Image (tube, rainbow, N blue to C red):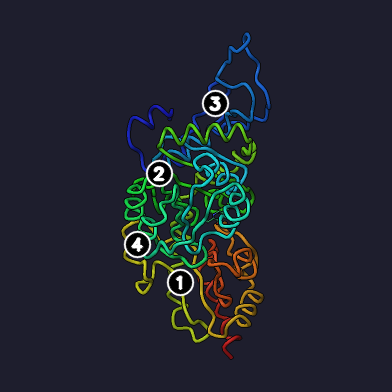
């Protein structure tokens, strides 16, 4: 199927994930387009480019295919692929912010996002203000007061799985002339389409669910705003933190199974969350698919599925949390998330160590779990053997 045929009809998500940007090679018929490693391109005369390519930082066919697919999956017109999620954030923020402007970000944003703004951008005159965006009324008052240039929301958030009402925060951001950026890494475009709810830009760490196999680091900025796209496209080339052709190819391969994977990640996470509620070793389960979660109703409206991430607070405090993460057999103690294999970690000491002592500090007894695609009964048995031991 050519991209024109795909465009002609609004195809479903999984169909686009498999076909957009993947038309068979016109010369050889390769069903999987090759990886274009060349750094430079022959010109048919000075400035007469054969297919628009002159130098691989500026443009590369493998990266272009990925960008086309990413834009399609978020229902957007533009996507830019970067060497990491943080490289994507950096390029975006330096494109849209000027010295003296402010950025409001959710109270438990990814630690690296806060560090980038607080330690790298602040010396250039950009002021970060953490605000709890899960409380829309209070957040609206703060945003009207602060009048930021950018509102940065993560939903579900990392690591507390807080849910932000994207449409409501988009309205108040636009009222004060701010852009709403949604970090959609946890949800994935399969589960949630922030642009459709009014966000201006979607940010991804493609390292997580989009790549999906814990073997490639990457990031993306996705938007339907032509002016933002122009600025980010310029920055992608001017600052040069592009994804390599092989990284772009691996990420694109991951996209093809995204729908299937996220459905199963979510189903297994729901089963595990329900199982852990009420276990005597567990004080609290944070999962938006539980009716008891404060953001459940919004997530049910805004998301197609609730996702594969959950976190729990241990009744026995930090010592119990340490014991829990150190004794599972199938859940590997490691940072990152979104791969086929289950992972477990202690945010306060690992992924969120950089925000301890700030307003974004996370509870010491909190354990974050990335539910993988193993048999869910095996995963539950693995968690139970440790929790029963902790509780004994
Ligand atoms: C991992 C992550 C990032 C950063 O992405 P990298 O690919 O590690 O640079 C940003 N936001 C969220 C929610 C993440 O989980």
Crowd around label 1: few <14 · some 14–19 · many ≥20 (10 Å): many
Instruction: State which tag comes first along the sequence, 2 or 1.
Output: 2
| Marks 4/2: CA–CA distance | 18 Å
Quadrant position of the C terminus in the picture: bottom right
Q: Quadrant of residue 333?
A: bottom right
| Marks 1/4: CA–CA distance | 19 Å
Q: Secondary structure at mark 2?
A: loop
Residue for badge 2? 200
Q: Quadrant of residue 263?
A: bottom left
Instruction: State which tag comes first along the sequence, 1 or 3.
Output: 3
Q: Is residue 389 left or right of residue 183?
A: right
| Marks 2/1: CA–CA distance | 28 Å
Residue for badge 1? 286
Quadrant position of the N terminus in the picture: top left
Q: Is residue 169 left or right of residue 41?
A: left
The one nearer the camera, 76 or 98, is 98
Residue for badge 3? 25
Q: Secondary structure at mark 1?
A: strand
Q: Nearer the viewer, mark 2 or mark 1?
A: 2
- Vertical comparison of 383 with 332: above or below: below
| Marks 3/2: CA–CA distance | 34 Å
């Amino acid at each position: 199927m050519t991209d024109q045929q795909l465009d002609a009809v609004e195809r479903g998500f999984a169909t686009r994930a498999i076909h957009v940007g993947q038309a068979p090679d016109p010369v050889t018929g390769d069903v999987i387009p090759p990886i274009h490693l060349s750094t430079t391109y022959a010109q048919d005369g000075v400035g007469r480019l054969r297919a628009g390519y002159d130098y691989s930082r500026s443009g590369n066919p493998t990266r272009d295919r990925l960008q086309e697919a990413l834009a399609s999956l978020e229902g957007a017109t533009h996507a830019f692929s970067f060497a990491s999620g943080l490289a994507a954030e950096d390029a975006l923020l330096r494109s849209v912010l000027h010295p003296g402007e402010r950025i409001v970000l959710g109270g438990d944003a990814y630690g690296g996002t806060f560090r980038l703004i607080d330690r790298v951008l602040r010396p250039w005159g950009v002021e970060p203000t953490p605000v709890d965006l899960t409380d829309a009324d209070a957040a609206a008052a703060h945003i009207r007061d602060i009048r930021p240039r950018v509102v940065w929301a993560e939903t579900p958030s990392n690591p507390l799985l807080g849910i932000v009402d994207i449409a409501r925060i988009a309205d108040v951001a636009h009222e004060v002339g701010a852009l709403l950026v949604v970090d959609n890494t946890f949800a994935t475009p399969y589960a949630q389409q922030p642009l459709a709810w009014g966000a201006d830009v979607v940010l991804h760490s493609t390292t997580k669910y989009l790549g999906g196999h814990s073997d490639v680091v990457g990031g993306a900025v996705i938007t339907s705003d032509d002016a933002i796209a122009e600025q980010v496209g310029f920055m992608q080339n001017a600052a040069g933190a592009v994804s390599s052709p092989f990284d772009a190819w691996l990420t694109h391969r991951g996209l093809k199974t995204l729908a299937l994977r996220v459905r199963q990640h979510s189903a297994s996470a729901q089963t595990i969350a329900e199982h852990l509620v009420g276990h005597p070793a567990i004080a609290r389960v944070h999962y938006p698919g539980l009716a008891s979660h404060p953001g459940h109703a919004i997530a049910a409206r805004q998301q197609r599925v609730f996702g594969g991430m959950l976190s729990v607070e241990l009744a026995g405090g930090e010592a119990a949390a340490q014991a829990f993460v150190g004794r599972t057999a199938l859940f590997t103690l490691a940072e990152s998330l979104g791969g086929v294999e289950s992972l477990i970690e202690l945010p306060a000491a690992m992924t969120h160590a950089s925000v301890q002592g700030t307003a974004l500090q996370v509870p010491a007894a909190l354990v974050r779990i990335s539910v993988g695609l193993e048999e869910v009964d095996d995963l539950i048995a693995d968690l139970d053997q440790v929790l029963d031991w902790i509780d004994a």
